[in-house]
Image (tube, helix red, strand yellow):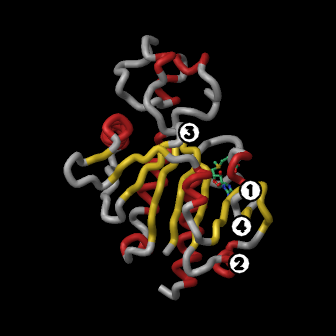
Amino acid sequence: MMHIVLAESEIELVPDKIKNHPAIKSENELLDATLHHSAMKNIEDAYRRGRPDIIHFFLNNVMESVLNKKGMLSTYIHTRNDELIHIKPETRIIKNYNRFKGLFSKLLMEKAVPENTPLMWVENKSMEEFLSEMPHKKIFFSRRGKRIRIHELGDIMNEDVVIVIGGFPYGYFSESYVSMADEIVSIGDEALTAWIVAMEAIVAYENVLKF
Ligand SMILES: C[S@@+](CC[C@H](N)C(=O)[O-])C[C@H]1O[C@@H](n2cnc3c(N)ncnc32)[C@H](O)[C@@H]1O
């Protein structure tokens, strides 16, 4: 089984501090840097926050993978506020971005969607807590990691593996949990998108399993 987590993802409800700014249409919406740029000037880490688009692209790719359809992938989104979103493999990710944002703001407020038989639910959990519960090999992807070639990825994967990819547009993983990695690997000198890195990892694992 592959467990894939998008760590420190920049998805959150509009912070209280800027709820009254004219750029904010509803206090129940997700922070979105494209729409709320002017309101975000006075919040910490503004340069990297408000990026639900990263989570949207990531989920649309990994949930549609052959690995997921074969029931061999567990997908998690960890957020900057230490929420851990669990997503059932059968979940169909909404393609329309505005509707996706609407569903995820509801998820962050109500902690589970749909209400009665949830496909996605939120737990309060840090990366340290999540990783310490995972007894499997943990491979972090980072440009600061050991440079390996993409075709070598399968060689470092065990039958059960945890893949950690950053869900933020700039910067690197927090120091608080990076020491929990068994391996930190870079697959290129370029800054790649989280969903491309995820798909390289997934395809490498599918090859290990001889799909
Ligand atoms: C847009 S990047 C984050 C920005 C970061 N400064 C960087 O360039 O890697 C999103 C995530 O994709 C992964 N990633 C991007 N490029 C990578 C590379 N060349 N090798 C391994 N992982 C990479 C990392 O997990 C990273 O946190």
For label 1, the SS is: loop
Name the amino acid, label 4: Asp
Nearer the observer, 78 or 47 = 78
Please give the residue where the numbered disc 2 appears in the rendered image.
152
The residue drawn where x is 24% and y is 48% is 114
Could you classify mark 4 by the number of other residues whose Cα lies within 10 Å: few (under 14), some (14-19), or many (20 or more)? few
Mark 4 or mark 2, which is nearer to you?
A: 4
Q: Is residue 34 left or right of residue 166?
A: left
Mark 3 or mark 1, which is nearer to you?
A: 1
Name the amino acid, label 2: Glu
Q: Is residue 84 left or right of residue 47?
A: left
Name the amino acid, label 3: Arg
**Mark sitting earlier along the chain (3/4):** 3
Distance of mark 1 from mark 4, alpha carbons?
Answer: 8 Å
Label 4 CB sits under 8 Å from any ligand 1 atom: no
Mark 1 or mark 2, which is nearer to you?
A: 1
Please give the residue where the numbered disc 3 appears in the rendered image.
80
**Mark sitting earlier along the chain (4/2):** 2
Distance of mark 3 from mark 2, alpha carbons?
Answer: 31 Å
Mark 3 touching mark 2, by CB under 8 A? no
**Mark sitting earlier along the chain (3/2):** 3
Position of residue 95 measured from the top left corner of the image (x, y, whole percent): 34, 50
Could you classify mark 3 by the number of other residues whose Cα lies within 10 Å: few (under 14), some (14-19), or many (20 or more)? some
Position of residue 50 measured from the top left corner of the image (x, y, whole percent): 52, 33
Image mark for residue 182: 4
Please give the residue where the numbered disc 1 appears in the rendered image.
179
Q: Relative to residue 96, is residue 28 depicted above or below? A: above
Could you classify mark 2 by the number of other residues whose Cα lies within 10 Å: few (under 14), some (14-19), or many (20 or more)? few
For label 3, the SS is: loop
Q: Relative to residue 191, is residue 49 depicted above or below? A: above
